[in-house]
Amino acid sequence: MSSESATVLMDMGFSKDQVERALQVTGNQGVEPAMEWLLAHSDDLNQSSGAAVNSAPTTSSSEDTSKSNETGDSPPSEVEAKSFKCNDCNKLFKDQGEVEFHAAKSGHTNFAESTEEKKALTEEEKLAQKRLLEQKLLEKRREREKREENEALEREKNRIRAGKEMVEIKKKLQDEELRKAIEQRKKEKEEDMKARQRIKDQIEADRQARREKMLQQQGVETPPPPPVVIPEVAKPAAKKDYTETRIQIRLLNGESLTQTFGIKEQLSAVRLYIELNRTDGDGGFSLMTTFPRKVFVEDDYDKPLDVLGLVPSAVIIVTKSPCS
């Protein structure tokens, strides 16, 4: 038995035995088939519940009998119980299952057997109960759909958040790799310049030694060698630390767009800006520069603008895509 379907039906007022029977007959296909069966067979269920009540032995305490004998009164005649009654709210119940369900739901504990018979529902009452049950079922369905919608929305938020975090991590790694590459290249250039200077100094020293030897052979007093002046390696001028670049975009229809981007933004950000703001149609397109001439390929769109040489400003031309 589906616990969820059983709970819904019992919340609607059906007893546990009735719910179990309805779900079993309908093959556990859900709440709606079971509810239809319960409403269609309410009379049969009432009769079977009444028979269960009638078969229950009537309670007659020996204590009451002894008291009646002492007083001389005749013992009360046994009366057949046809239902159970809640003395707290005066509701009638057909069987023990309904009593237990009502007690669990309301917290009432004062019950007694009753000779009143719980009447079967009329057609109008059946329709009214059916409408009420359908309304409750609709409300539960809406609550479930709302809950599922909120859960799906939360999952999407988590996915977007995780995607942003991955993009930030990837960008940090790329920036770190780029910084290390620049430092390594700078170090290699400095070492290369020092090596060249050492070679020049050695050549000059060898030349001076040959000159002195030649003068000694000719008997000419050699003047003292001039002091060796090691030229300082010229330090490159400090580059301005740009954080943004101004990009002018020329569209296919001759119009231009101008936008400022961060130097670490990828070329794909420029492409996305063009797609959102272009006025020259919706066809595929490629990007290129003229000075120097370069047609950007697919791998270039993942590179930062400063790596592509588009800082502090650049002109990008939109061209038709070869496959469009």
Image: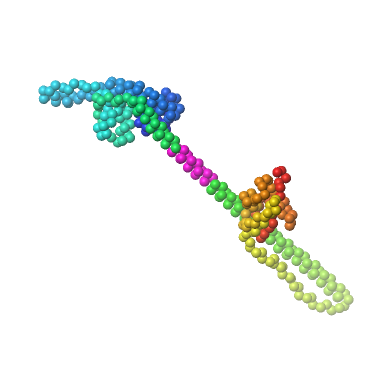
The quarter of the rendered structure image containing the C terminus is top right
Q: Nearer the viewer, residue 70 or 308?
A: 308
Would residue 181 be seen by someone viewing this image from the given angle?
Answer: no
Percent position of residue 189, x then y: 71, 61
Q: Residue at x 26, y 29 (%)?
A: 85
- Magenta segment: does it hold 288? no
The magenta stretch spans residue 155: yes
Q: Residue at x 73, y 64 (%)?
A: 193
Toward which corner of the image does residue 200 lie, by quadrant?
bottom right
Q: Can see residue 106? A: yes
Query: Mainly helix, strand or loop, the magenta region?
Result: helix
**Magenta residues, start to end:** 143-159
View extreme (right): residue: 218
Where does the image place residue 195, in percent across and percent down from the top left?
A: 74, 63
- Position above or below: 138 against 246: above
Horizontal relation, residue 298 to residue 98: left or right: right
Q: Quadrant of the N terminus?
A: top left
Answer left or right for 121 relative to 208: left
Viewer-side residue, 32 vs 19: 32
Image coordinates for residue 78, horizontal then vertical, percent = 20, 21
Query: Percent x, y for residue 88?
Result: 25, 34
Q: Quadrant of residue 188?
A: bottom right
Relative to residue 157, is residue 61 depicted above or below?
Answer: above
